[in-house]
Amino acid sequence: MKVLVGGIYHESHSFSNVLTDLESFRDVLFLEGRDSIDQLRSTTSEMAGFIKGLEECGFEMVPTLWAWGLSTAPVEAKTLDLFISIVQRAIEEAGEIDGILFALHGAMVAEQALDGDGYILSKFREFVGQDIPIVVTLDFHANISELMVEKADAIVGYDTYPHVDQVERGFEAADLLVRTVQGEIKPVMVIEKPTMVVVPNVQLTDKEPMKQLISLAHETETEPGVLSVTVAGGFAYSDVPEIGPSIVVVTHNDRAAAVMHARNISNRFESLREEFTPQLSGVSDAVARAVESGNHPVILADVGDNIGAGTPGDSTFILRELLEQKTESAVVIIADPEAVSLSIAAGVGQTVSLVVGGKTDRFHGDPVELTATVRLISDGVFRNRGHMRDGIVEDMGRTAVVESDGIKIVLTEKKMPPWNLEQLRSVGIAPEHEKIIVLKSAVAFRAAYELIAGEIIEVNSPGLSSVDLTQFEYRNIRSGMFPSDEAETT
Ligand SMILES: [Zn+2]
């Protein structure tokens, strides 16, 4: 048996001004052909799960591509068409295939289609016809559509946020595909969409209210005939009709049971509306609390500039407040290639005048003028350790650590989500020994930093990933969505 495998993964921020082209994927991860299997075999990716599941059954793999980008603006039309053409060519060259096993994100917006993932699956269906099974994995932030459900035979979404179950979900998807190809099961899939939008901060799967929904999904998976249940939180910054959470239930040939279970979970979801309203601290209060705290390090989560959600990583609201409140010791990471160049030109040990951050767009504060001493210069390349992207080499571009009034500012050429402690360790900063660390992330940082944090404070900072959705002009969402813009500042 021959199964086509690959992945095209992009979470698109409709209000970002950062172009998403082929280079954006090459900058993060773009593998073609055999490389897409060999290089991912021992990583924490869905592909590692696909490989394990298919090899155990002696199935042959037909490689295509693995394109993984950071969250930025909707994907350029010709880039998505190129990715799809790589898959089409692989299908033609393989002659006959028995199935498709593919990793998508589920919140891709493309220039040619608001529902980018639905578009991809429609093309795959066109290439292989109705009889070849297609099983896909989706990110927890997928805005799952009717079209995706129609074009795929089964969808398996992550159960975790922060995301740590890519390998297991890849394996689960492989198992469903193998059993479908062997005629053992006949997947039937339905979707329900609660009428609401949920921001990332209240989507943690090991905390309420999401925790009980994931538990309910797992309980439902033990019901007779149920093959897989997905609860997806959705991505609040994609301006698309399918925005928001989804419940997907896959059964063995039992539509009525699938509908019943999906409605049951969807009803529970909607009953938790109030609990899904975020409660965050204002910037000034958060900094004051961090300064007073005796539990170090205090993590200040810069929720409005959550790089993983498509922001520029150069917000200055918290940095400015730290300087104004005369904080004596803190670490802030800011993406600012211009400041990096100036610092490198000055050299280690030298004093430099900088204008830092706030340069990409109007959402992330004004640049901050400061005088700093250059402490360290690095190539910005490091290898992750621990369960978040373990083993993957990251490149944040040339990097300079400068210090101003006790505040260490890690200036990077490229923005890099704070997924792993090795990011700071690679530039000589031991995160466990710091007093305050500002991280441009809403939730994903927890996989690494919860282990060492004395205290975590989520900051209601402005920005492209703010919990205040009223700052965005949505044009495409369906009417009657629960306004999750009622974030309270406490
Ligand atoms: Zn996600």
Image: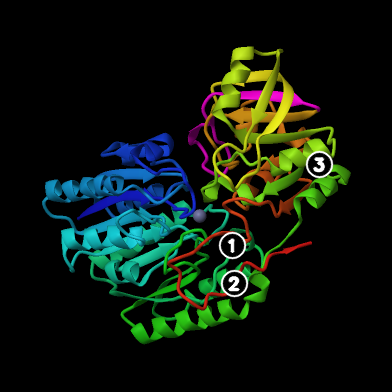
Q: Mark 3 points at which residue?
A: 296
Amino acid type, residue under disc 2 in the picture? Pro
| Quadrant assignment for the C terminus | bottom right
**Residue 408 percent location from the top left of the image:** 73, 29
What is the spatial separation of the Cα atoms under label 1 and label 3, in whole angstroms? 32 Å
Q: Mark 1 points at which residue?
A: 469
Front label number (1 vs 3) = 1
**Residue 30 percent location from the top left of the image:** 35, 38
Drawn side of residue 127 relative to residue 163, left or right: left
Q: Name the residue under label 2.
A: 483
Observer able to see residue 309: yes
Colouring method of the image = rainbow
Drawn side of residue 218 relative to residue 154, left or right: right
Q: In this view, does 235 lie above or below 450?
A: below
Find numbered disc 1 in the image and state the secondary structure of the residue it sits on.
helix
Viewer-proximal residue among 165 and 198? 198
**Magenta segment, which residues?**
382-405
Amino acid type, residue under disc 1 in the picture? Leu
| Quadrant assignment for the N terminus | bottom left
Q: Is residue 485 above or below residue 355?
A: below
Observer able to see residue 59: no
Viewer-proximal residue among 411 and 257? 411
